[in-house]
């Protein structure tokens, strides 16, 4: 396996594109996001099988996010001397181990430990994925490579929830996690076959994270990321439980609704990819504003099956623009510290998931699904306010690729 570090000190420095390696990264992202989303679609059977509440089962999402948060912050400094190829394969191996532990968990403690391993894998892989992908292709092809990488997230969003829900009802939730382990193994093999050796390009330390965070506008931006993703996961983590208990949908109907959510999310990703090139700030504000408005409408309407279906699909459409818009914002504002900025970004998302799932679980257990949606809308309203007041846009002329994302 040859090294590419002699000619890729800057993003997009490879002489020839390594598309097979990019594809292996995409499979890795798809596998990780699929495993991350599975508890949301299998919350009810997991809770029933382990004799715990839905709120307690939802803490599997919180646990993953907390350890993903810690790992994403520490990984670039802790592994600053490690070959990125070996590091990414290690995270894929952790993904396999995580899914196997969950699949055979006899109770909540082992389930949560398995999700701890997933959090480490998710935080580490995500923090490095953008920087590594940018090293696998020439500079002119970086936008295309990143679009391919993000397609793994979109496809996982489309398939993970509805397919997980359907297969959970057909095979059982444990077999779904065994299938997820197989998917992770496929990613590991693909990375072993295709990823080149990649030595670190800098001596990143924990101090670098602080230096990036205190740059003008970065701190408020990360707060806005936390609020947007947190508001979403208050809603999304307990969506199946709400649809079952509120509108009385069957598991078959919920699978179809979640498929509609995923398809709309994929469409939203495509539309946002074009919109952010001309109206990045508008996209940053529009998505949480629309999602918060949908939450308010759901609360005012009450448990109405038709309205709930429309709301879920529209939510998926607007949330599709969120990762695209914020990834573009990162590329505009921190183009020179991709690994450190990626760590902060992933850390913000993971703490948002942890807080969102945790808050949603408490609210759902004590006051029910409608109150959970109201809490989601409140957090999203705060996100809109924080974006309008604190988020800056800056496109450094020295980094041409950022303007094309």
Image (spheres, rainbow, N blue to C red):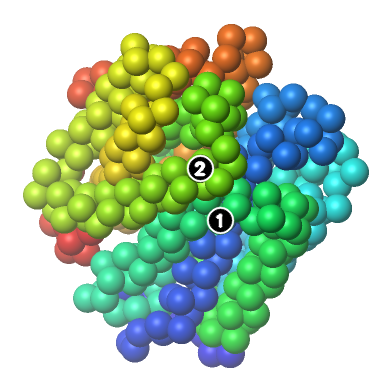
Instruction: Out of 249 and 2, give the one closest to the viewer.
Output: 249
Q: On the rendered image, what quadrant is the C terminus found in? A: bottom left
Give the residue pinned by disc 2: 253
In x, y percent, where is residue 118? Answer: 68, 51
Q: Could you tell me which secondary element the residue under label 1 belongs to?
A: helix
**In the image, is residue 248 above or below residue 283?**
above
Q: Nearer the viewer, residue 390 or 311?
A: 311
Q: Which residue is located at x 34 percent, y 15 percent?
A: 301
The residue positioned 27% from the left and 22% from the top of the image is 293
- Marks 2 and 1 sit apart, C-alpha to C-alpha, by 12 Å
Q: Nearer the viewer, residue 52 or 36?
A: 52
What residue is drawn where x is 34% and y is 27%?
307
Q: Quadrant of residue 339?
A: bottom left
Q: Residues within 10 Å of mark 2 (few under 14, many from 20)?
A: some
Q: Position of residue 212 (x, y in %)?
A: 39, 41
Q: What is the number of the mark on residue 163?
A: 1
Which quadrant would residue 225 be assigned to in this image?
Answer: top left
Q: Is residue 293 above or below residue 333?
A: above
């Amino acid at each position: 396996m040859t090294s590419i570090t002699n000619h890729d000190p800057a993003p997009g420095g490879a002489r020839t594109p390594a598309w097979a390696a990019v594809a292996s990264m995409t499979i890795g992202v798809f596998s990780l996001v699929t495993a991350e989303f599975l508890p949301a679609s299998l919350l009810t059977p997991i809770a029933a099988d382990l004799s715990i509440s839905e709120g307690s089962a939802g803490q599997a999402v919180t646990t993953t996010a907390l350890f993903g948060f810690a790992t994403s912050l520490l990984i670039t400094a802790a592994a600053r001397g490690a070959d990125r190829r070996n590091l990414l394969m290690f995270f894929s191996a952790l993904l396999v181990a995580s899914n196997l532990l969950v699949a055979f968990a006899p109770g909540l403690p082992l389930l949560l430990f398995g999700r701890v391993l997933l959090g480490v894998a998710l935080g580490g892989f995500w923090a490095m994925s953008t920087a590594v992908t940018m090293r696998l292709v020439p500079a002119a092809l970086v936008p295309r490579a990143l679009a391919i990488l993000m397609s793994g997230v979109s496809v996982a969003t489309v398939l993970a929830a509805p397919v997980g829900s359907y297969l959970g009802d057909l095979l059982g939730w444990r077999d779904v996690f065994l299938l997820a382990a197989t998917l992770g193994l496929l990613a590991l093999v693909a990375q072993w076959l295709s990823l080149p050796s990649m030595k670190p390009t800098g001596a990143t330390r924990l101090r670098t994270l602080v230096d990036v965070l205190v740059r003008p506008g970065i701190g408020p931006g990360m707060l806005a990321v936390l609020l947007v993703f947190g508001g979403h996961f208050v809603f999304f983590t307990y969506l199946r439980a709400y649809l079952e208990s509120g509108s009385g949908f069957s598991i078959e109907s919920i699978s179809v609704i979640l498929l509609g959510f995923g398809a709309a999310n994929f469409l939203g990703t495509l539309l946002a990819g074009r919109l952010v090139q001309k109206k990045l700030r508008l996209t940053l504000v529009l998505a949480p504003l629309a999602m918060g408005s949908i939450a308010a409408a759901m609360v005012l309407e009450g448990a109405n099956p038709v309205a709930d279906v429309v709301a879920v699909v529209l939510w998926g459409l607007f949330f599709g623009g969120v990762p695209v818009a914020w990834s573009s914002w990162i590329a505009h504002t921190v183009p020179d510290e991709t690994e450190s900025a990626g760590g902060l970004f992933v850390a913000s998302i993971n703490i948002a998931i942890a807080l969102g799932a945790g808050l949603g679980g408490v609210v759902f257990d004590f006051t029910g699904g409608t109150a959970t949606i109201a809490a989601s809308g409140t957090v999203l309203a705060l996100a809109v306010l924080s974006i309008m007041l604190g988020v800056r846009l800056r496109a450094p002329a020295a980094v041409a690729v950022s303007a094309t994302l």
